[in-house]
Amino acid sequence: MEALQAYGWPGNLTELQQVVTGIATTTTRRLITADQLPPRLRGSPNWAPLTEFLATQERQYIERVLNSVSGDREAAARILKIDAARLA
C-alpha cells in the first residue's frame, strides 16, 4: 500500500487501472504484494528487459481476447491469427 501511495501516478486512474489489471491477469493470488508491482512503483531504477516486457504485454493481450470470446481458444486463435496450440 505504501508503494501505491508514494507513486506520483502521472497517468492518473488509467495508469492505476492498467497496473492492477496487469497484475490480476498474471497471478492467481488474491492479494497484491509489493514484489508484483512494476519496478517504477517500487522505486527501482531497473527496467525490465524488453523481452520480459513484451511477453507480459502479449499475455495480457491474449487474456483480453480470450475473455472477449468467453475462453473459446479456437475463436481467440482466429482473431489473433495464431495457432490455437499456442494458447494452451
Image (cartoon, rainbow, N blue to C red):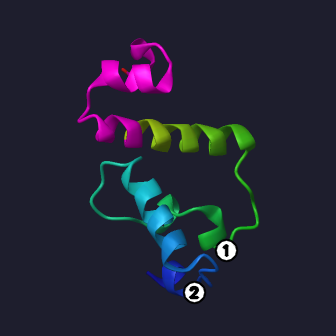
Quadrant housing the C terminus: top left
Q: Residue at x 54, y 37 (%)?
A: 58
Q: CA distance from mark 2 to mark 1?
A: 9 Å
Give the magenta part as a residue range: 64-87
Give the answer, above or below, for where 67 lies relative to 43.
above
Q: Amino acid at mark 1?
A: Gly
In what element is the residue under mark 1? loop
Q: Amino acid at mark 2?
A: Ala
Residue 38 among those drawn in magenta = no
Residue 87 in the figure: left or right of residue 43: left
Residue 78 among those drawn in magenta = yes
Residue positioned most to the front: 79
Q: What mark, if any, has residue 6 been given in the picture? A: 2
Q: Residue at x 48, y 77 (%)?
A: 13
Q: Nearer the viewer, residue 7 or 34?
A: 7
Residue 27 in the figure: left or right of residue 38: left
Q: Are marks 2 and 1 in contact (CB under 8 Å)?
A: yes
Q: Which residue is mark 1?
A: 43
The part of the image, by quadrant, that contains residue 9 is: bottom right
Image coords of residue 48 (percent x, y): 70, 51
Quadrant housing the N terminus: bottom left
In what element is the residue under mark 2? helix
